[in-house]
C-alpha cells in the first residue's frame, strides 16, 4: 500500500512537523458500489490511532450515483455557447465542454451560472481570473469532465461533486475501528479544497498544505483514499 505515486514523495514537512502520506490502492469504484463497504475493505488493518483518512470526492460522488456517461447528457444551446468561453487548464477540462457546462446549469441553476459568466466577463477585462467559479460555487468547481488520462470508464464520464460531504465524513468516521479524523477532499495538481471533514478550520487548512502536491495522482493510479500519519 505504501508506494508513492510516480513523482510523489511519501513524506512531507509542514509547519515544522513531518507527515507520511500513504496512498490506498483500490479496485475501480463503480456506480452502485457501497462506500461503506469500500472504506471498510481497504482500510482494514491499515489505520493507527491519530491518523487522518482522506477520501477523494470523486468516489463519494460515484457511489452516490452522481456519475454520468457523456451519451447520457444532452447539452442545451446555452451550455454549448457558454462552454466556448471557459479556459481549459492543464489539469482538467472543467466546464469547457458542453456536457460539463450542462451539468453545471442543472446543479447550480441557470441564473447563477449566467451571473457567474457575466461577472467573469467583466473582471477578466481587468486581468482578474477565477471569478466564474467563485460566483458559481463549489458545485461548479467540483464537476469533473472526461480526460484521456482518467481511469476508464471515467475517461468518458462527467462526475459531479458529492452531496453532503461533511455528513459523509462524519459517517465514515463511525465505520472505522480506530479513532481517526476523516476528510473528503478535492485535490488536483494545482491545489485543492476540503469539501467536508471532522477537522476544525485550522486542521483543514493544514491538510490542504499537506496534500498540495496531490500525492494520489490524477490518472490511472487507482488510489482514491489515503492516510496522513505524523512521523
Image (cartoon, rainbow, N blue to C red):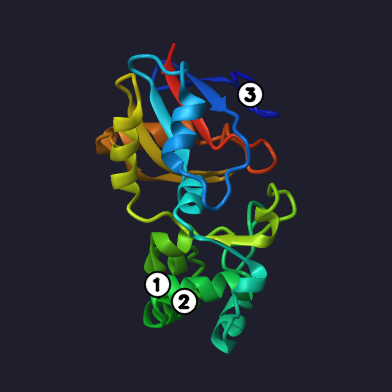
Q: Secondary structure at mark 3?
A: loop
Q: Are marks 1 and 2 in contact (CB under 8 Å)?
A: yes
Mark 3 or mark 1: name the one nearer the start of the chain. 3
Residue under label 2, please give it. 105
The residue sitting at 37% across, 37% down in the picture is: 183
The C terminus, quarter of image? top left
Q: Quadrant of the N terminus?
A: top right
Mark 2, other Cα within 10 Å: few <14 / some 14–19 / many ≥20: many
Tell me the CA gap for discs 3 and 1: 36 Å
Is 180 displayed left or right of 55 in the figure?
A: left
Label 3: which residue?
Answer: 4
Q: CA distance from mark 3 to mark 2?
A: 37 Å
For the residue labelled by badge 1, is the local secondary structure a helix, a strand or a loop? helix
Label 1: few (<14), some or many (≥20) within 10 Å? Answer: some
Judging depth in this view, the residue of 88 and 68 nearest the camera is: 68
Q: Are marks 3 and 2 in contact (CB under 8 Å)?
A: no
Closer-to-camera residue (9/173) = 173
Which residue matches tag 1?
108
Residue 80 position in % (x across, y down): 61, 82
* Left or right: where 45 falls relative to 27: left
- Pinpoint residue 120: horizontal percent, then vertical percent: 47, 74
Q: Position of residue 26 (x, y in %)?
A: 59, 33
Q: Is residue 87 visible?
A: yes
Residue that protrudes farthest toward the left in the picture: 200
What residue is at 44 percent from the left and 54 percent from the top? Answer: 64
Q: Secondary structure at mark 2?
A: helix
Q: Is residue 118 above or below residue 218?
A: below
Check if mark 3's residue and mark 1's residue have beta carbons within 8 Å.
no
Numbered circle sitting on residue 58: none
30 left or right of 48? right
Amino acid at each position: 500500500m505504501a508506494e508513492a505515486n510516480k513523482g510523489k514523495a511519501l513524506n512531507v514537512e509542514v509547519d515544522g512537523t513531518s507527515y507520511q502520506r500513504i496512498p490506498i490502492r483500490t479496485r475501480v469504484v463503480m456506480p452502485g458500489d457501497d462506500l461503506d463497504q469500500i472504506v471498510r475493505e481497504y482500510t482494514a488493518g491499515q489505520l493507527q490511532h491519530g491518523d487522518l483518512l482522506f477520501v477523494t470526492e470523486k468516489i463519494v460522488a460515484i457511489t452516490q450515483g452522481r456519475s454520468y456517461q457523456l451519451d447520457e447528457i444532452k447539452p442545451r444551446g446555452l451550455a454549448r455557447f457558454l462552454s466556448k468561453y471557459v479556459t481549459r487548464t492543464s489539469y482538467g477540462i472543467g466546464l469547457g465542454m458542453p456536457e460539463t457546462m450542462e451539468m453545471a446549469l442543472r446543479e447550480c441553476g441557470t441564473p447563477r451560472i449566467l451571473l457567474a459568466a457575466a461577472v467573469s466577463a467583466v473582471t477578466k477585462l481587468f486581468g482578474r481570473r477565477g471569478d466564474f467559479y467563485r460566483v458559481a460555487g463549489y458545485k461548479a468547481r467540483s464537476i469533473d469532465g472526461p480526460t484521456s488520462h482518467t481511469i476508464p470508464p471515467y475517461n468518458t464520464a462527467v462526475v459531479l461533486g458529492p452531496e453532503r460531504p461533511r455528513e459523509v465524513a462524519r459517517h465514515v468516521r463511525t465505520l472505522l475501528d480506530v479513532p481517526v479524523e476523516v476528510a473528503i477532499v478535492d485535490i488536483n495538481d494545482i491545489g485543492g479544497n476540503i469539501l467536508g471533514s471532522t477537522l476544525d478550520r485550522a486542521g483543514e487548512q493544514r491538510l490542504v498544505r499537506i496534500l498540495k502536491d496531490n500525492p494520489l495522482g490524477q490518472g490511472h493510479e487507482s488510489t482514491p483514499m489515503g492516510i496522513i500519519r505524523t512521523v
